[in-house]
Amino acid sequence: MGWLKTALLLCLIALTGSRSVAGDQTLLLVAHADVTTQHLTRDTTRAIFAMRQRTWPDGQAVRVFVLPNGHPVHERFVKERLTVYPHQLQLAWDRMVFSGTGQAPDRVRHQTEMLERIATTPGAIGYLEREYLDERVQVISMD
């Protein structure tokens, strides 16, 4: 019986370790290379993704890109980095669109498309897992 407990403990440690490795799919806030802002607060980031803040501090227009509702990376980003629920963000976008006071962000199908759109759209912002980054975009730090 002692070997079984040891085996189960080792399995648990392995699973926990693999979860932290999978959790190392760090979500990063990324922007077009010409964006001069290098750091955003959580509140400012939330305002940008809620489409309430439409310009960067230097006056350049912000273009927001998001993955589809229900996409696991979108859900993680909204919950972990913006500290809201995806449905709350969607409600904010819907209110703006239906009231005529704003628009929803641009949706992309997957992270590869997110990278392409951010890299080629001046003023763009979005989010990616670290493995999708390349030199065409910059990481924006966030507290």
Image (spheres, helix red, strand yellow):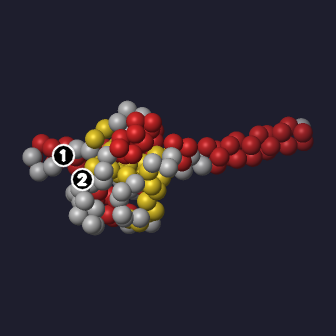
Toward the viewer: 12 or 54?
54
Asked if disc 1 and disc 2 are in contact, CB closer than 8 Å, the reply is yes
The answer to whether 103 appears left or right of 114 in the picture is left
Residue in front for this viewpoint, 11 or 95: 95
- Quadrant location, the N terminus: top right
Q: Residue furthest top?
A: 109
Left or right position of 111 against 88: right
Residue 73, image quadrant: top left
SS for dot 2? loop
Name the residue located 46 percent from the left edge and 62 percent from the top edge: 141
Query: What amino acid is labelled 1 in the image?
Result: Gln
The residue positioned 83% from the left and 39% from the top of the image is 7
Q: Is residue 26 above or below residue 107?
A: below
Q: Would you place residue 33 above or below residue 72 in this image?
A: below
Q: Say which residue appears at 37% left-offset and 52% top-offset.
A: 32
Q: Position of residue 119 (x, y in %)?
A: 39, 45
- Badge 2 local density, few (<14 within 10 Å), some, or many (20+)? many
Residue holding disc 2: 51
Disc sitting over residue 142 in the figure:
none
- Which residue is denoted by mark 1 in the rendering? 103
Q: From the top left corner, tell me how far across and down residue 83 is, in percent.
A: 39, 56
**99 sits left or right of 42 in the view:** left
**Residue 63: percent from the left, percent from the top?**
28, 49
Q: Which residue type does callout 2 highlight?
A: Met
Quadrant, the C terminus: bottom left
Report helix, strand or loop for mark 1. Answer: loop
Q: Is residue 12 left or right of residue 89?
A: right
**Number of disc labels:** 2
